[in-house]
Amino acid sequence: MVDVEVRQDRGVRLGARHLVLPTLLVLAVTLLLYGWPVPRLSEELYLPLVKRVADASYLRGDWTFSGSFGEHWLFDHLFSPAAGTLSVNAFGWLGRLVFWPILGLLLIRLGMRFGLAVWPATFAVVFWLLSNQSVIGGEWILGTFEAKTVAYVCFLGALLALTSRRIPLGLALIGLTISFHPAVGMWAAWAGGIALLALPDTRRAALRWCWLAILLAVPGVLGALSAVGSASQALQRFVVLEAIPYHTDPFFGGKTLGWGQVALHLTLLLAMFAFNIWSFVTSKRDLTQRFFFAFQVAAAVPFALAFLARALHVWSYLRLMPLRSFPVIVPLVFFFQAFRYARKIARPPGANRRKRRRARREATFVLAATLAIAVLPTAPVFAAPRMIRRNIAAWTTVDHESRAFDWVRMNTPTGTSCIFPVDRQDSFDRAERPQIANWQAIPYDRLGPWKKRIDELVGGPAYFSGPGWHGDLPGLRAAYNRLTSAQIDALAAKYHTTCLVTETKYPYQLLHQDGPVRVYALVPF
């Protein structure tokens, strides 16, 4: 996928061993920012799904897991042997520690394609990680182990192959990107394909070998089609604006800063894009520069259309997540270009010692300004320190709900159907018991029934009425904890649940209490 040897400045040839320490540095920063206990974020759904492929008895009877989730078919079946023999925790950590260093290595190699030495390329990647990777859209390349982790390995490998004129390999890897994660691969294929066709020196080979990408993309396309169900405009609007607006709504700015944050992030992203264009215009315009210029321009099209779709309420387009590519690639290229520019001004040709010292000061200022861009405007507070604090807290703070889920797993029959807090997606792995539904585990082939179940878990559809965003986890948790005994009884009767985990005091048989979290029996145990 990548060359073992790369040429550095002054004709020095570097082997793979010279990339070990830089890769470990990227891995260390990634662990510091994202090394939460497994599962984290989307791992909470996608890793148990892999385990379910390996073991049909795992979470048998759970409504969410009864669906197809076929969009990750290749990943689920390829990794199911490992998931079947390991716990979700061990499986997740194994995947992280295998694929995160590979991603770090590929990102460094990509920076070196811009003419950077190993360590400047490494620090450019670190700056990009500190900037939270994606300015808009909530996309990440490093941070979890799931289908898109492997998809991004294929995608970055494709970028390296295409910029070294290995078109068949690059197209094959783009096809695999689609098969591992159709949403990532679709937009990667769009921008990468347009870039290949736009460049005269790659156009013929791209047309000649495009069948290879199409062939290898077939599993992903078929899996994605199997996971798509019909949905009304109202349901699609609900998904875009309430369920996952951080991925789908270009106007989403959270619950606090709102439009101010949207304007700040959009201005920053467009400024990065403008700098990237200027860097291309002033460069020697080698294949890497020309390819990434065309790639960014092509990726900007679906990104811009997302704003138009939002204004015109075209929810079906926004559900395709057109914010995935442009907002994550532009900052990455920006940091590569910024380091390249700093290197350029630090080494003025034919300058005397005084001018060289001045040039080094200017280059230092450019890098300091670049770092400030990485950690200041990309979040309302310093993004990186906040993420590090949350990471440390995840390891050191007692999670009473998690321990309650563990108790349920160890002390109730396997088929026990439960009512769990609607915001805790990790309950699938930790409790290993069927539940009614979960806010973050969206079965796209059954949006109507899922929405109905969620409504019942937060006290009724009225919770989602009114202005503003209602999908924040603290708000959902509070609504769940306000359920009355009558509403709990109705849920138990309708869905045949016999166990309840909550922070609210109810007149049911108390089986266990961990801090403020209670486990109730809804029928005599």
Image (tube, rainbow, N blue to C red):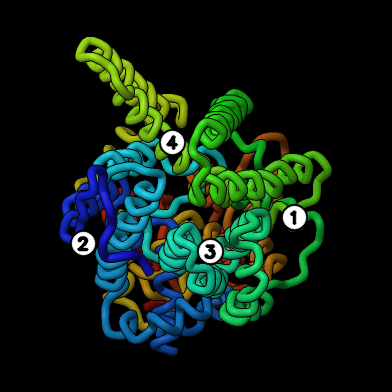
Q: Earlier in the sequence, mark 2 or mark 1?
A: 2
Q: Position of residue 268 (x, y in %)?
A: 54, 28
| Residue positioned most to the front | 350
Residue kind at label 1, given as amino acid type: Tyr
For label 2, count other residues whose C-alpha is less than 10 Å away and answer few (under 14), some (14-19) or many (20+): few
> Measuring 35% from the left and 48% from the top, which residue is drawn there?
112
Checking the image for residue 317, the label placed there is 1
Residue 328 to residue 520: above or below: above
For mark 3, what is the residue?
Answer: 441
Give me the C-alpha separation between circle 3 and circle 2.
Answer: 40 Å
Give me the C-alpha separation between circle 2 and circle 1.
Answer: 43 Å
Q: Are marks 2 and 4 in contact (CB under 8 Å)?
A: no
Check disc 3 and report its element: helix, strand or loop. Answer: loop
Q: Is residue 121 visible?
A: yes
For mark 2, what is the residue?
Answer: 16
Residue 246 to residue 16: above or below: above
Q: Position of residue 325 (x, y in %)?
A: 57, 51
Q: Earlier in the sequence, mark 1 or mark 4?
A: 1
> Measuring 55% from the left and 58% from the top, which residue is drawn there?
439
Q: Are marks 4 and 3 in contact (CB under 8 Å)?
A: no
For mark 4, what is the residue?
Answer: 337
> Measuring 51% from the left and 78% from the top, which residue is drawn there?
62
Check disc 1 and report its element: helix, strand or loop. Answer: helix
Q: Earlier in the sequence, mark 2 or mark 4?
A: 2
Q: Position of residue 500 (x, y in %)?
A: 44, 64
Nearer mark to the viewer, of 1 and 4: 4
